[in-house]
Image (tube, helix red, strand yellow):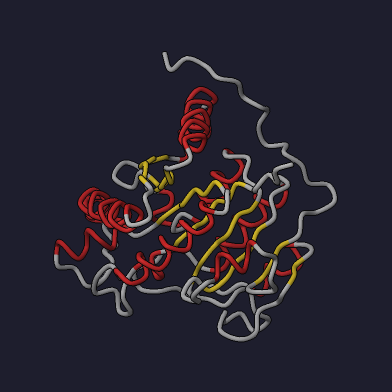
Amino acid sequence: MSVQRPRLVIKLGTGLLTRPGGSSLDARQFRRLAAEVAGLVAQGHQCIVVTSGAVAAGMMVLGLTERSTDTPTIQACAAIGQSRLMRVYETHFARHGLAVAQLLLTHQDLDSRTRYANAQNTLRRLLTHGGVVPIINENDSVAVEELRFGDNDRLSAEVAVLAEAGMLIVLTSAEGLTRDGTGQGAPIPLVENVDDVLDLASDRKGKLSTGGMTTKLQAVKRAVEAGIPAVIANGRTPGLLERIVAGEEIGTRFAIPAFAGKKSRPQITQISAD
């Protein structure tokens, strides 16, 4: 009898995908992370990557060294950088015989029943193929919410609910949630109630990032209340993904509360795109 493998949503932040100092996309990181995701796919997992990094990639083309505060400039960077970002993903996943599929979403897409259903149906079809890794990003060239507030943290939780995932893994530059709020000490191994630790969050972030631990905890809360366990961990640790999925005590794990359930949306059947 075959064992059903969980569907995983893996969120990769800007700080993980750029070189220290934000001078360029970090090819070594993409190579390693793609190999780790491919390893999970080979084990039978269905993996969805929620990525940041498009704005940073576009900034580099425009010669900007610091993130602009001007929204049209940031959106222009995203429009330039998105294709570059996807080209890097395509190159590194192809080494493992995997194709990538780009999905650009906005929160309006997830608030619309029809567009929500269409996105859900697209994801299901991609995942049943087996050789495709969906790469999801906020459509930053037309939307601004993640540009201002979350670095795709919130989006990753919504995608986890949309995809009916078995786990949300948020990879960042912090070791997890720590009691001193820095993210650099020993992480709290298990959190039973997210509300109890919200005051430990620090909003320290890299100069190209817009998220912080607060938005990550908000994303985790959204996931666990929908019945999806979550982990926050340091994405620069080699071999991290397989260890997390294997249940090792690494980073901070967030338990599903007793009242949780897939309550956010009803099961949606296939509908016409018309």
Check the image and report above or below for 178 versus 64: below
Q: Is residue 60 left or right of residue 213?
A: left
How many marks are shown on the rendered structure? Answer: 0
Q: Nearer the viewer, residue 16 or 205?
A: 16
Picture residue at 58% right of the left edge, 46% below the top: 160
Instruction: Report x, y in % for residue 18.
Output: 32, 70
Q: Quadrant of residue 233?
A: bottom right
Instruction: Report x, y in % for residue 119.
Output: 48, 31
Check the image and report above or below for 217 versus 102: below
Instruction: Report x, y in % for residue 188.
Output: 70, 77
Q: Is residue 29 left or right of residue 211?
A: left
Residue extending furthest toward the right: 258
Q: Quadrant of the C terminus?
A: top left
Picture residue at 71% right of the left edge, 69% below the top: 197
Q: Is residue 200 left or right of residue 36?
A: right
Q: Is residue 138 left or right of residue 81?
A: right
Instruction: Report x, y in % for residue 75.
Output: 27, 50
Q: Quadrant of the N terminus?
A: top right
Check the image and report above or below for 149 versus 117: below
Picture residue at 47% right of the left edge, 14% below the top: 272
Q: Quadrant of residue 81?
A: bottom left
Picture residue at 31% right of the left edge, 75% below the top: 19
Residue extending furthest toward the front: 1
